[in-house]
Amino acid sequence: MLRGAGGTGKGAQGRQRGKRPSCRAKGTLDGVETTVSDPLVGRLLDGRYRVGERIARGGMATVYQGTDTRLDREVALKVMHPGFAEDHAFVERFVREARIAARVSHPNVVSVFDQGDDEGLVFLAMEYVHGRTLRDLLRERGRFGAAEALDIMQPVLAGLAAAHDAGLVHRDIKPENVLIADDGRIKVADFGLSRAASTASAQSTQGVLIGTVAYLSPEQVERGTADMRSDVYAAGVLLFELLTGSTPYAGESPLAVAYQHVNGQVPAPSTLAPGTPSAVDALVLAATQRDPGLRPAHAAALLADVRRVRRDLPEVADPVADLGHQTLVVALPGTAAAAKTDQAPKPGKPPKELKAPRKRRRKGPILLALLLVLAVAAGGTGWWFGSGRYTPVPSVLGQDQPTAEATLATADLKSEVSESVYSEDVPAGLVISTDPEPAVDARRGSTVALVLSLGPERYAVPELANLTADEAKATLEGTKLALGPVAEEYSETVEAGRIIRFDPPVGTSSKPQTPVSVWVSKGPAPVPVPKIVGASAADAQKALKSVGLSGKEVGREFSETAPKGVVIRSDPAPDTVVNKGTEVKYVVSDGPPPVPVPNVTDKKLSDAEKILSDAGFKVSVNKPPVVILNRVISQSPGGGNTAPRGSTVTITVI
C-alpha cells in the first residue's frame, strides 16, 4: 500500500498576508486566488487562539494566520480537516507526534507552540513565518547552481538532524515544507503530520499522496514504513530538484511515479544539468540509494558530506539572505560574492539586474592584481590568515573521552566536556556529538565541546511490597518511573489495602516513565460458615476455627427436637460467605421444655404407668420382693412438680 501525507498544500504558512477582520478568507487553489466564506475566521479556539485570514488549504489541514491572545503574538493555526479529526487513530498519533515535535528547538525548524482540540477541531499552534516556500522560489528560479543548492540544503539538513536527534522522523520532506523567511532564514515545517496520517483511514487520506509521491522512499512505497534514512532519501530528491529544476521521476499517475522509486535508480543530476560537479552527483546518488542500508543513516551524516563537498566549490553570495525578498545579486567574477543566479540567462532574455557591466570588468582585474600583490607580500603569513588558520573538526563520535581528546589534539584543537546526556544508542562514556560538528572548519587552537553519553537512562524498580497504592506512586515518581495498573486480589498474609506484588520486580532496570503494575490486597478471601447446627458446642468451636472464624455461644433454649448441649442455630447461618475473622454467634439447646408431673400416688401400677407415659415421661418402677396391693405409694419427682418431657419419673409400689 502507498502511504504518504501532505501537510497543507501550497506553502502552508510561508505567505505573508495582511490581517482582515471579515469572515471572508482568501485561499490559493492551483495558482488561482479564490475568495470563499470560512466560518472559522474570527473564531476563538480553546479560549486562546483567534482565527484570522486563511492562508492555505491542503490534503490534511487548513492553515490560518492567527493570534495567541494570551501572549499577544502572531501564530500559524493548522486545523485538521474533519475527515482526519474524526479518525481516532489519527488524532491519537497526531497529538503524540505534536508533543515530540514541540521538543525540537532549532533555528531551522518551525516551532510548535501548542496543540488543542476545540469541539472536534484538532489544531496546532505554530511559529508564523513571514516569507514563502522553496516551491515558490523553484517556480521562479527554475533551478540553482551547485554551490547555491548545497547552501540551501545545509540549513534544511541541520533542522532535519535536530529532529532525528530527538527521535522524530519527518516523512514528508519536499519544497512545500521548506519555508524561507523574508530575512533569508530557512526552516523545515510539518514535522509529525505524515506519521500521524499513516494511521488514518484510507478514506481520510485519499488525495493526500499526490503532492508527496515524488519524494517517497522505496520502503515507504513498498511497506509503508519510514525511518531517518527515508528522510535522507527525500532530501536527496530535493537536492536533485534544486540542481535540475525537476524531480527525478515523472508519470501519469502517483502509482507510476511510486513504481519508479521502487524499481529505478535516481539518475545523476549532471545528466539533466551538465556541469554539475561529480562530487555533488555523488551526494545525490548516495542519499537516494534504493537500499536504505546504503544511504547515510542520519541527516547529520548527509549534512557532514554536504559541508565537505561545499568547501571544495567556489564561494557565492549568500544564496538565501535575500530569497524572501526575491532579490537577485550579481557580484564580481572571481570574488567571494559570486552571482546568485543559478544558471546562465535563457536565450532572448537579459540577465536580471546586470548593472554597470563595464565597471565590473575594470574592477575585477584590479582586485585580482591587488590580491596577488598582497599574497606575495604576506608570504608564509598569508597561509595562517588564509586556509591554514582553520582546520576541519575531525569526527570523534563514538570515541571515549581520552581518544577524542587525542584525535582533536592532532588537528590542533582543544576539547572540553560540555555536558553528559543519556543515550539509547551510544554506550556510556563515548562521544555523542560535538560543537562544532564534524567536518566544520574551526580555528586552530579553539575548543571543541564534547557531549558524552551516560548510556541508556535506566532506573531500578524500588521495593513496593506492603506499601499503599498512593505510597507506591510517590515512591515511583521519585525514581522517574510511573504507577501502572492497580489490581486487587485476596491475600491470607498481606493486610487489606497494601501491595502484595508488583511487576517489573524490584531491582529491574527500566526506562523513564515505565509503568509498574501493582496488585493490592483485599485481605483474606471470604469463606462460607460451616454447618455447626446439631454439633456440640465444643465441636462447633473447632469447626469455626478451622476456616478462620471465631465462635461465641450467645444463649440456650429448650428444644423439642434438639438434645441438650447441641447447637440449635447460628448467625450468620451455615453456608453464608463471610470474611475471615468474622465472629459466628450460636445458640445451644437446653433440651425439651419442662412440663407438670402428674400425681399418681395411690394409683394402681398399670394406671400410673399410663398416666405418666401419656404426659411424656418415662417410668421407672421400684417393687418390693412381695407386692401385696400393687399400688403406688411414692413418686420422684413428686406430683405437681415440673420436669423435662421425656425425663424419667420413678414410682414405688407395695
Image (cartoon, rainbow, N blue to C red):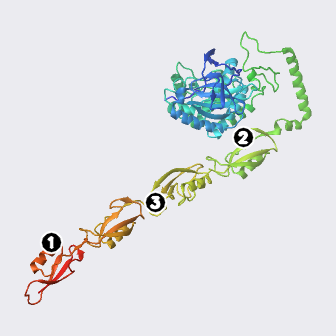
Q: Nearer the viewer, residue 616 or 203?
A: 616
Amino acid type assigned to the residue bearing label 3 in the image: Gly
Amino acid type assigned to the residue bearing label 2 in the image: Pro
Label 2 vs 1, first from the N-terminus: 2
Q: Is residue 335 visible?
A: yes
Local secondary structure at mark 3: loop
Q: Residue at x 86, y 21 (%)?
A: 364
Label 1 vs 3, first from the N-terminus: 3
Label 2 vs 3, first from the N-terminus: 2
Front position among marks 2 and 3: 3
Q: Label for residue 164?
A: none
* Residue 248 percent across, percent down from the top left: 60, 23
Splitting the image into 4 quarters, where does residue 650 fall?
Answer: bottom left
Residue furthest out toward the bottom: 625
Residue for badge 2: 438
* Residue 95 percent across, percent down from the top left: 58, 36
Residue furthest out toward the right: 377
Local secondary structure at mark 2: loop
Q: Is residue 300 visible?
A: no
Dot 2 and dot 1 residues touching (CB under 8 Å): no
Residue for badge 1: 614
Distance between the Cα atoms at labels 2 and 1?
Answer: 119 Å
* Residue 386 percent across, percent down from the top left: 84, 35
Front position among marks 2 and 1: 1
> Vertically, is 604 above or below 142?
below
Distance between the Cα atoms at labels 1 and 3?
Answer: 58 Å
